[in-house]
Image: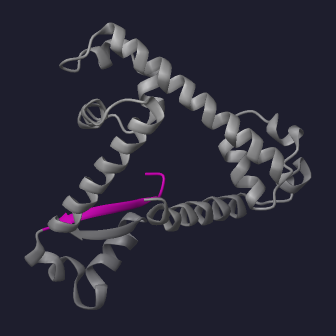
Amino acid sequence: EEEDRIEVVVPDDQLSLAIGRRGQNVRLASQLTGKAIAILTEADASEKRQKEFAERTEMFQTELDVDETLAQLLVAEGFGALEEVAYVEVDEIASIEGFDDDLAAELQSRASEALERREAANREERRALGVEDDLAALPHLNEAMLVTLGKAGIKTLDDLADLATDELIQKKRQEQCRRAEDAPKRA
């Protein structure tokens, strides 16, 4: 949803049919839905899921300081972000087979600490970029958002006020594209 796109998975032998002659089918479907459409074969989708599983597992291992098995259990149960672990009801984590209330509480504590570390790192980066505290005081902006604004040259309230809504959306999309391009480099 954040990327405003749809991923469609088709059997390998149906790929050309889904795309259509010169991309006509996918182009028309995109126009009808108003969203970008990416067509993946079953093999591509499986590879993507495996990659996402491995990335999330590694993130939980690093951020929560847990072993690979525990991290894999979290991912297999549908947890994909630290926020989910930190803010979900303890019972939901404790209901995972092999987990108990104490382990769930410890995992939530570690997730909260990791989120605090991220926020502190983003705060330092924001300040290094020269984003003013007045801008940071605006409601609903977190430090990661402020870093994105700072990288786009928006460092003061006046800079922000000078932008139209469509310019903000464009800058957000540019940042998402930059992150997508950087993702393989980090792996």
- Magenta region, residue range: 1-10
Could you tell me which residue is drawn at 35 percent across and 68 percent down?
Answer: 37
Locate residue 77, reporting x and y percent.
25, 32
Q: Along the line of sight, which residue is nearer the eye, 151 or 172?
A: 151
Q: Residue at x 33, y 42 (%)?
A: 57
Residue located at (42% from left, 42% from top): 59
Give the residue at x 89% y 50%.
Answer: 156
Q: Position of residue 140 (x, y in %)?
A: 69, 35
In percent of width and height, residue 126 lies at 77, 46
Q: Residue at the far right: name it.
A: 158
Please, is residue 180 above or below residue 50 in the view? below
Q: Answer with left or right where residue 80 lies relative to residue 170.
A: left
Depth check, front residue: 131 or 36: 131
Q: Can you say whether 147 is above or below 45 in the image?
A: above
Can residue 61 be spotted in the picture? yes
Position of residue 82 measured from the top left corner of the image (x, y, whole percent): 46, 33
Based on the displayed image, in which of its 4 quarters is residue 4 positioned? bottom left
* Predominant SS along the magenta part: strand
Q: Residue furthest left?
A: 13
> What count of labels does the image hold?
0
Decide if residue 40 is on the left or right side of residue 156: left
Q: Residue furthest bottom?
A: 22
Left or right side of 18 for 14? left
Q: Is residue 46 left or right of residue 153?
A: left
- Residue 150 lies in what quarter of the image? bottom right
Residue 142 appears in the figure: no
